[in-house]
Image (cartoon, rainbow, N blue to C red):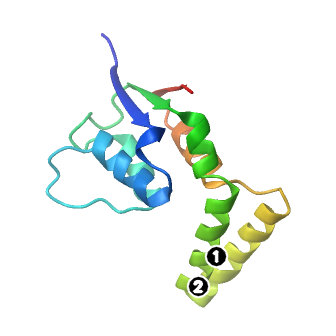
C-alpha cells in the first residue's frame, strides 16, 4: 500500500505564524475549529486523526524549499520568539525561556527550525523528505 504524501511548501510561509497556517492547510480538513498555533499543537497534528490521515497512519511528509524555511525559522525568528515568550509567560516560566535564549545567543541552542525538525523526527509513522 502506498503512503499518502503530504507536502509542506516553504514558499508558502516566511515566519512561525504563517508556518502554522501552512501546517493547518496541509494537515487538517473540515475540523470546524481552529488549531492551536504552537509547537505542542503541531506535534499533535503530526500524530494524525484531524481529517487528512488517521491517527499514526504511515505517511510521507515532504518539505519543499527547506533552505528558505531554515533561514525563515532561524536565529532571528527564534530570538524574537523567545523574547516574546519571556514577556508573555508567568514568572515561573520566564527563567526557562531566558536560559533558552542565552543558549541560542551562545550558539548552543536550537532554532525554531531545529525544534520543528526534531518534532517531526520523533514520529516514527512519518517518512520525512526534504527538497530545496
- Say the numbered circle drawn on residue 83: 1
Nearer to us in this view, 56 or 41: 41
Can residue 89 be seen here?
no
Residue 93, located in which quarter of the rendered image? bottom right
Establish if 42 lies above or below 12.
below
Q: Residue furthest bottom?
A: 91
Tally of marks: 2
Side of 10 relative to 121 (left or right): left
**Residue lying at 19% horizontally and 43% vertically, measured from the top left:** 29
Residue 132 drawn at (x, y percent): 57, 27
**Residue lying at 76% horizontally and 57% vertically, measured from the top left:** 109
Establish if 94 lies above or below 19.
below
**Residue lying at 39% horizontally and 50% vertically, measured from the top left:** 44
Screen quadrant of the N terminus: top left
Q: Name the residue under label 2.
A: 87
Other residues around mark 1 within 10 Å, as few (<14) / some (14–19) / many (≥20): some
Residue 107 drawn at (x, y percent): 83, 57
- Say the numbered circle drawn on residue 126: none
Can residue 49 be seen here?
yes
Marks 2,1: beta carbons within 8 A? yes
Amino acid at each position: 500500500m502506498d503512503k499518502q504524501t503530504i507536502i509542506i511548501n516553504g514558499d508558502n510561509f516566511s515566519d512561525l505564524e504563517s508556518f502554522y497556517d501552512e501546517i493547518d492547510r496541509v494537515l487538517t480538513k473540515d475540523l470546524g475549529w481552529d488549531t492551536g498555533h504552537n509547537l505542542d499543537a503541531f506535534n499533535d497534528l503530526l500524530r494524525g486523526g484531524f481529517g487528512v490521515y488517521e491517527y499514526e497512519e504511515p505517511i510521507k511528509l515532504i518539505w519543499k524549499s527547506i533552505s528558505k524555511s531554515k533561514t525563515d525559522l532561524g536565529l532571528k525568528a527564534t530570538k524574537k520568539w523567545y523574547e516574546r515568550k519571556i514577556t508573555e509567560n508567568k514568572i515561573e516560566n520566564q527563567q526557562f525561556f531566558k536560559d533558552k535564549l542565552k543558549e541560542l545567543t551562545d550558539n548552543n541552542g536550537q532554532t525554531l527550525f531545529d525544534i520543528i525538525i526534531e518534532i517531526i523526527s520523533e514520529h516514527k509513522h512519518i517518512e520525512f523528505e526534504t527538497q530545496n
